[in-house]
Amino acid sequence: MKPSMLAKLDQLANRLVELDELLMSEGATNNMDAYRKMNREHAEIGPLVAVYKSYQEALADIEAAQEMLADPDMKDFAQEEIDSAKARTAELDLELQKMLLPKDANDERNIFLEIRAGTGGDESALFAGDLLRMYTRFAERNRWQVEMVSESASDLGGYREVIVRLVGNGVYSKLKFESGGHRVQRVPATETQGRIHTSACTVAVMPEADEVEDVNINPSELRIDTYRASGAGGQHINKTDSAVRITHLPTGIVVECQDDRSQHKNKAQAMKVLATRIKDVQLREAQAKEAATRKSLIGSGDRSERIRTYNYPQGRMTDHRINLTLYKLDFIMDGDLAEMTNALIAEHQAELLAALGDN
């Protein structure tokens, strides 16, 4: 491990001792904001320092075993201890490096998930519905909340476009690599000749802005239109102009929201989506610049890139960025995405570690 990393770990270990003393001191709870802040810091540092202590113990075991090598009776035992401790040290070294990687500031944010049908007509819209169900089932497995924001249903089922908000712990961290082109190969239900068709959808995963005010939006640069909502919703939905369409003139971003009966609530939700989209454009520009610098396989933010293929006849899913193929398509479409998302996160961590090694 690099001396700079060891120095940082020593600082964090000392800081943890300091926090223990501060949290146990008299009057620690007099300032509850400061107390909560120290508790959060303690929770962040604690696991890292625990691994660092295990790393130090493994180094000490190596040193102690090396002293026993001179004793002929203990030589074999000592060598076994050294080999075991070195293997443990290597594992802990890698774990510490991963824990020290810079955190993505958006990882704990909620997201807006946008799915748009692309090439393939009605079959593409049906696939958009399948993708929405896949992500919804994944959200259920993670006990995340799913809120419908906007939907444009197609005539034969599925969606031309759908936006949902996912709320929960670490949503963005697990789904941030889902943005891009998703291609499906299968025989559509309407196909009489049994021919395999290829169609595609675009997925956008956008971290939610904390507040609309966090993004600089000039009211004079907005065009806001109201209209009568369409689709399901009973008799009330078509009686008032409750649906809202907001156009951000400088970027051309258009957001529509008609999910709620209240025009005020639809406008507030649309403004939140608009702020998130503007923030997302800024984020993708930064990601693309970073990816160009280190030739990143993932996380470039390029929506035009085909990232994944779902082949139904072969029962396989292939992620083209990391050459991962899984022959369990039925499980994946039912929301079993853990193996895939973990592989993408691991690849991203490997890239970051490689970049640190180059510095």
Image (tube, helix red, strand yellow):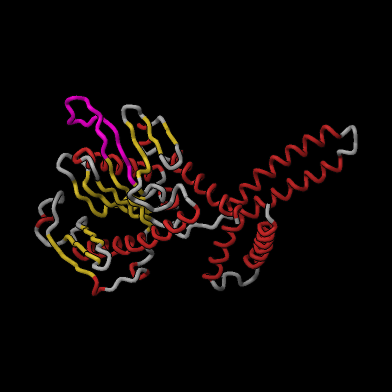
Q: Is residue 83 found inside the magenta-colored segment of the image? A: no
Q: Tell which residue pokes out farthest to the top in this image.
A: 193
Marker count (numbered): 0
Q: Is residue 186 found inside the magenta-colored segment of the image? A: yes
Q: Residue at x 56, y 73 (%)?
A: 30
From what the image shows, is residue 207 above or below residue 130? below
Q: Quadrant location of the C terminus?
A: bottom right
Position of 296 compared to 315: left or right? right
Q: Position of residue 286 (x, y in %)?
A: 42, 60
Position of 351 compared to 307: left or right? right
Quadrant of res 285: bottom left
Which residues are drawn in magenta?
A: 181-199
Position of 351 compared to 220: left or right? right
Closest to the observer: 82 or 221? 221
From what the image shows, is residue 212 above or below residue 2? below
Q: Position of residue 339 (x, y in %)?
A: 46, 38
Closest to the observer: 164 or 120? 120
Closest to the observer: 185 or 43? 185
Q: Position of residue 19 (x, y in %)?
A: 64, 64
From what the image shows, is residue 315 above or below residue 129? above
Q: Residue at x 18, y 59 (%)?
A: 261
Q: Position of residue 273 (x, y in %)?
A: 29, 60
Q: Residue at x 45, y 55 (%)?
A: 292
